Amino acid sequence: MELLIFAMCTICLLYCLNQFYKLYLQKRGQHCYLVDYECHKPSDERKIDTKFCGSIIARNKNLGHEDYKFLLRIIVNSGIGEQTYGPRNIIGRRENSPTLEDGILEMEEFFVETLDRLFRKTGVSPQEIDVLVVNVALLSSTPSLTSRIINHYKMRGDIKSFNLTGMGCSASLISISLVQNIFKSKKNAFAVVVSSESIAPNWYSGNDKSMILTNCLFRSGGCSILLTNNPDFKNRAKLRLKCLVRTHLGSSDEAHNCCMQTEDNQGRLGVYLGKNLPKTATRAFTKNVAEIATKFLPFKELVRYIVLKYVGKKVPILDLKSGVDHFCLHPGGTAVIEEVRKNLGLGEYDVEPSRMTLHRFGNTSSSSLWYVLGYMEAKKRLKKGDKVWMITFGSGFKCNSCVWEVLKDLEDGNVWGDDIDRYPPKTTANPYLEKYGWINQDTLEVPEGLVFD
């Protein structure tokens, strides 16, 4: 009898150990590691400097004096510098007659350059990729952009591909979230996320002030990212995803309508940005922080906050820096960066990467975050064990954010390699004001040398 009881206990113990081992293996394969990423740096002939930007505005026949004043005033306060990049059709003075091929060429030039470098640097071949996610909000071609990449690199026939459109500036983290969920059911997989925006066919040529803003802020760029859940790559990976939270306010008409692609009253296509967008972004951000803060803040900080909330006389403020070391903010514009900085109680050092990214590359939509991360890495800020909080906003209206853990000291110069020693500059004063100060005159007296054609 005792032998039977012993045998039964042994079997139960072995069964429990086996279940725990299975659970361990399951969890072990569910981590999402960022192996590496490559940001796009277009060629120098695509740079948009002060003079060229002014000529683009000047040749728009639909603008009047007040429109010019409005546009150049926006550019002066945009935080954008002299070395951002535009698509080839705009450089070639064809912004009013774009073609589908312009958009496809812009995307192919970006993804071939970044993916070639990514595969070469990591040693992972295109045929090893199990999942491919492409997010470009304003370009939907047939075949899809994912199909074009699969064809170019002759990827496997069983690859899982996803082509996301209409997601706006927050699409990059939506793609990461999609990969994270796939990793839960697929072991030892490789995934590539390709994130960009199509500027070439989406230039607005009208004079609606709520739609022409995008011309001032958005620039060409993109990023390709290699992810895996293979634990053997832990020591080679740069980052590990700790948590990711997506917040969507789409059920609210006000939030849904504050940022959308539409036509003006003359039938010209563009992207509308409503005056209520900052208010909507604050609402979405507040909801997102309330959820994600519980996932990365230390337990003692949460207890302190709860105690002070119900016992103290003043409304307590969460010490977010107790849970993260770096803040990777979407460089959507100086106003966006400043609003998030004030809401989180951050210093200038914390938002420097976002401000410098906006100054050097402009707002490259969903890929902007990775230029910000690249700045931190090139400045050798990211040390093993550090936590990085990424925050993005997008149409719909969405606020998505995630926290990464740095797995080793990072110091790759990446896309910032040639420029990083010049940043931050002594001044980021915009040269547009000096060159185009005449625009504030009561009458339009065009200076010599500037031709409206």
Image: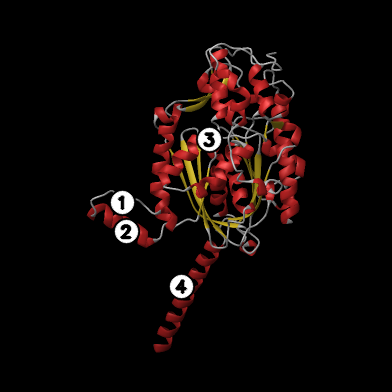
Residue 245: x and y in percent read 46, 47
| Residue farthest to the bottom, as pictured | 2
Q: CA distance from mark 1 to mark 4?
A: 45 Å
Q: CA distance from mark 3 to mark 4?
A: 55 Å
- Mark with earlier residue (4, 2): 4
Which residue corresponds to mark 1?
A: 316
The disc placed on residue 333 is: 3
Which residue corresponds to mark 2?
A: 304
- Mark with earlier residue (2, 3): 2
Mark 4 or mark 2, whichever is nearer to me: 2
Type of amino acid at the residue the image marks with label 1: Pro
Type of amino acid at the residue the image marks with label 2: Arg
Q: CA distance from mark 1 to mark 2?
A: 9 Å
Type of amino acid at the residue the image marks with label 3: Gly
CA neighbours of label 4 inside 10 A, class few (<14), some (14 to 19), many (20+): few
**Looking at the image, what colour scheme do you see?**
secondary structure
Q: CA distance from mark 4 to mark 2?
A: 38 Å
Q: Is residue 140 above or below residue 298?
A: above
Q: Secondary structure at mark 3?
A: loop
Residue 27: x and y in percent read 52, 62
